[in-house]
Image: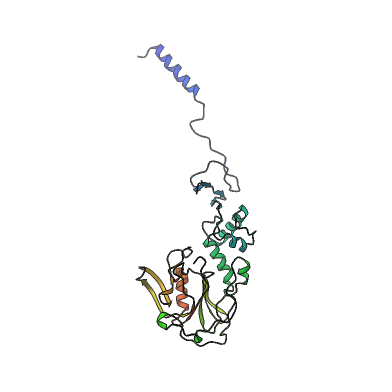
Amino acid sequence: MMSRRMACRVTAVLLAVAAAVPVGTATAAPGPPPPAGGRALTGPASPATAGRTTAGRTTAGRTTAGRTTVACAAGRGPYQRQVERWLRLAVDGRQSAADCEAVRAFQTRQGIKPANGYAGPVTWARMRLLSARTAPTDTGTEGASGDAAGPATGAVPDPASGSAAGPASGAATGGASGPAAGVVASGGCPVRSYRVACVDLKRQLTWVQKGGKTLFGPVAMRSGGAGHRTRTGWFRIYWKHKNHWSSLYNAPMPYAQFFSGGQAFHAVHGSIHTTGGSMGCVNLRLADARKLWSVLKTRDHVYVWGRRPGS
C-alpha cells in the first residue's frame, strides 16, 4: 500500500503539470468563416493554390469565387506584338500587367487553357480565325489588327490556262473558267464559279468557296515547315482515302485528300499549333477534316499561296 507521504508527492507532481499546460491547447479553435463574397482570406498557400516555379521564378495563382486563377505569364510570347495590335493595346512587344490581363480575359472568353496571358501560337491562331470567319478572303481588317495584308490583288491564272503536271501528281490539268475567272479577292484566293479549296499559308487558314459563297471554314490548319514546304499553285484533289496510313512516316492520315503528290489535307490527333510545321501536308483537327471530306470531291480545285511564317 502506498504510503501517505508518497501519495502526497504524486498528487503534487500532477497538480504542477496541470498548471503548466494552458487550458484549450488540445484542440485549435476554428477560424472565422469566409466572407459572403466567396473570396478566401489571405493565408498560407495550400498545395492546390500554391505558385509554380518556372525558370527560377515563382508565380502564384489567386483564388476568386471558389476557383483558382492561373498566374499571369511574366515573359513575352512569340506573337506579343500581333496580339497587342489585335486587342488594340499599346504595341511595344513587351508583356505588361495590363497586357496580361487583357490577353487572359480574351483566353477566358475563348476557352483557351491555361488562361495565363501568354501571347502564344494558340491564342494568335484563334485571333486570326476570328478575323477571317466573316470574310476569309478579305484581309483588310485583319491587317489592321495584327496580320500583314495578303498577296497583291491581281489576276490569278485559271487552271485551264496553265500546262501543269498531270493528274498523277495532283496538279490541275483543266477545268472551265467560270464567269468570275481572273478575279481574286484581296486575301489571295481566286473567285471561281466552281469549288476552290483555299490554303492560306501565311495566315495558316483553309476554307472552301464557290463564287462569292464560303462552303466550309475558315478553319485553322498546319502546313509544311522548313525543308518540307507545302507546294504552292493550282492543284486538284486526285485521290481520297478515308483511313489512309502513311508508309513513309508510319503514321495515320485520317480523311486524307491528296492534291499534290504525297501532300494532302488530313486530320491529326495532336495539336496543330506547333512551331515546326508538318511534313508538307495540310493538317487539320479531326472534326474539321471530317467535315472537309464531305465538302470536297475528286477533281475539285485547290489553290495554295503564301508562305508559312518561319518556314
| Residue 6 image-quadrant placement | top left
Compared across the picture, whether 202 is left or right of 278 comes to right
Image location (x, y in percent) of residue 161: 51, 86
| Residue 187 image-quadrant placement | bottom right
Query: Residue at left 36%, top 70%?
Result: 248
Image location (x, y in percent) of residue 106: 58, 60
Query: Residue at left 41%, top 11%?
Result: 5
Image location (x, y in percent) of residue 21: 49, 25
Instruction: Determine if residue 49 is in view.
Output: no
| Vertical order, 197 against 101 (above or below) | below
Q: Which of 70 and 63 is in front in this view?
A: 70
| Vertical order, 48 against 192 (above or below) | above
Query: Residue at left 41%, top 15%?
Result: 7
| Vertical order, 274 against 185 (above or below) | above
Tell me the quadrant of the picture where the N terminus can be found: top left
Compared across the picture, whether 136 is left or right of 163 comes to right
Query: Residue at left 51%, top 88%?
Result: 176
